[in-house]
Image (cartoon, helix red, strand yellow):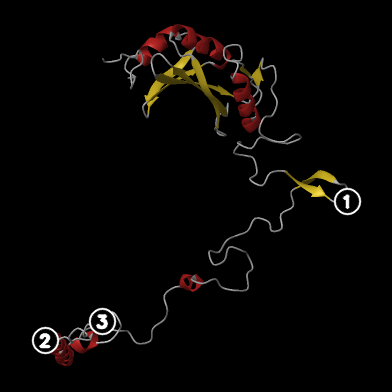
Amino acid sequence: MAVLHSAPKFASNEGVIDAISESISVWLIDAGEAHGEVSFRVKRDDIARVLETLRDDHAYQQLMEIAGVDYPDRAERFEVVYMLQSLTKNHRVMVKCSASEDTPVPTVTTLWPNAGWLEREVFDMYGVTFAGNPDLRRILTDYGFEGHPFRKDFPMTGYTELRYSEEEKRVVYEPVELAQEMRSFDFLSPWEGADYELPGDEKSRGAPTVNDVKTTEKPGQTGAGAAANANAEKRTSAAQKASTQDAPGAPDPTSKEGGK
């Protein structure tokens, strides 16, 4: 007997943008579909109302993820992306809003408790604050960490490094000290000022200088000609003669005792 499921295996995006846009038109900035995904850009201050509408009126019950994006050239450089899933429709949508360092985003912990952890991660990595989050602390970086790692203006080496001090018998934080500062690579050696040459580096010096230019205007310069043909024919005849000779016979059988 066939079993019917309420959720289809593949949910179509047809009509989703029109239906949701009508419900959130007051807060909607724009909507679109790209790479098979439906997304809505809404006003930052109304993000909680939009997500509540999608949860209660359009059956997007689960908050799957909250992600951050950094666009340094924009006036509001950060973008917060909410990914919702409907279990009954087997469908997902994305809701986006923009923010800056000084413009907090309303928390959605009142709608989904797991949003507390997700908002903490965006705050830790990008520095976006969420108004109303009851426990907005760093979640991935260490205590006393300065800066936000996913910002494009954050140095790749970080600001501080930690090590265990035998003198103080504890872990200490110190400013980063690079054994070698940023280098200008010359594609010969990965280290600046090396007094040796790595295998293969000689190829970067250009083509070798050749005094006598080799040409193939005559058959003799290509290795062909009458002499080469005669030599090849001689080798072929010798090989054919060897193949026609009788092969040696099999050895005589031996008895179990090892005698003939």
> Is the residue under label 3 in contact with that under label 2 (CB below 8 Å)?
no
Q: What percent of the width, then of the height, locates residue 166?
A: 85, 51
Callout 2 environment at 10 Å: few (<14), some (14 to 19), or many (20+)? few
- Label 2 and label 1: CA atoms lie apart by 88 Å
- The mark nearer the N terminus, 3 or 1, is 1
| Nearer the observer, 179 or 76 | 179
Q: Amino acid at mark 3?
A: Ser
> Is the N terminus in the top left, top right, bottom left or bottom right quadrant?
top left
Q: Amino acid at mark 1?
A: Glu
Which residue does the numbered mark 1 point to in the structure image?
Answer: 167
What residue is shown at x 47% (from left), y 16% (from top)? 29
Check the image and report above or below for 186 versus 216.
above
Which residue does the numbered mark 2 point to in the structure image?
Answer: 244
Q: Which mark is residue 182?
A: none
- The answer to whether 12 appears left or right of 101 in the picture is left
Secondary structure of the residue carrying numbered label 2: helix
- The mark nearer the N terminus, 2 or 1, is 1
Which residue does the numbered mark 3 point to in the structure image?
Answer: 255
| Nearer the observer, 109 or 190 | 109
Q: Which dot, 2 or 1, sits closer to the camera?
A: 2
Q: Which dot, 2 or 3, sits closer to the camera?
A: 3
Q: What percent of the width, then of the height, locates residue 211?
A: 38, 86
Secondary structure of the residue carrying numbered label 3: loop
Q: What percent of the width, then of the height, locates residue 134?
A: 69, 16
What residue is shown at x 41% (from left), y 11% (from top)? 20
Q: Amino acid at mark 2?
A: Thr
- The answer to whether 124 appears left or right of 68 in the picture is right
- Label 3 and label 1: CA atoms lie apart by 85 Å
